[in-house]
Image: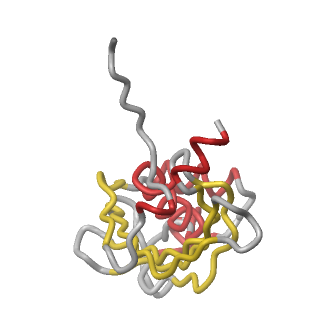
Amino acid sequence: MTRVVEQRGLYFDELEEGVIYAHKPGRTVTETDNVLFTTMTMNTQALHLDAAWSSGQPFGQRLMNSMFTLSTMVGQSVTQLTQGTIIAQLGLTDVTFPHPLYHGDTLYTETVITGKRLSSSRPGQGVVTMQHTGHNQDGTVVALATRTCLMWTKEAHAAQS
């Protein structure tokens, strides 16, 4: 019999508070990413689309759309933490962008589990709070977000299948 190994995230009971989960590989962001995401989401902000105008602004160039940065940062954590083990994303809070991300930068993300508790109303499920930190190739923090998710316990998910 052939053994099957399925790629998945971690279950509620496997996540450890205070551990830094480093998500690799990084993601080098491009002008195409920025223009497509910005226009697809109907965000006409010139800071993302107009190179001539942006060159006269305080950062001197176009900035990556902050929602793209946030989405990519959360997305980088999925395969390691929540792939197939999440029930629902409950919320995002404390989202900040302390430094811009530019075309050609590489985004790296780390996640720390800052809290977890079993659900009192949903047996076999737990609420997990995560702090995502995105930084560029130089180590400069470009984004922070606190994310709360409803996660399966391993036993309950197996019983549900």
Name the residue at the left extreme.
Answer: 138
Q: How many labels sit on residues?
A: 0
x and y, in percent, of residue 43 in the image: 71, 64
**Residue at 55% in and 45% down:** 84
Which is more toward the observer, 51 or 28? 28
Name the colour scheme: secondary structure
**Residue 118 relative to residue 142: left or right:** right
**Residue at 53% in and 84% down:** 96
**Residue at 73% in and 64% down:** 122
Q: Quadrant of the N terminus?
A: top left
x and y, in percent, of residue 3 in the image: 33, 21
| Vertical position of residue 75 compared to residue 159: above or below | below
**Residue at 45% in and 57% down:** 81
**Residue 103 relative to residue 57: left or right:** left
Quadrant in which residue 2 is drawn: top left
Which is more toward the observer, 159 or 98? 159
Which is more toward the observer, 96 or 7? 7
Q: Quadrant of the C terminus?
A: top right
x and y, in percent, of residue 56 in the image: 49, 81
x and y, in percent, of residue 102 in the image: 40, 68
**Residue 101 relative to residue 137: left or right:** right
Name the residue at the top extreme.
Answer: 1
| Vertical position of residue 52 compared to residue 57: above or below | above
Which is more toward the observer, 105 or 161? 161
| Vertical position of residue 83 compared to residue 26: above or below | above
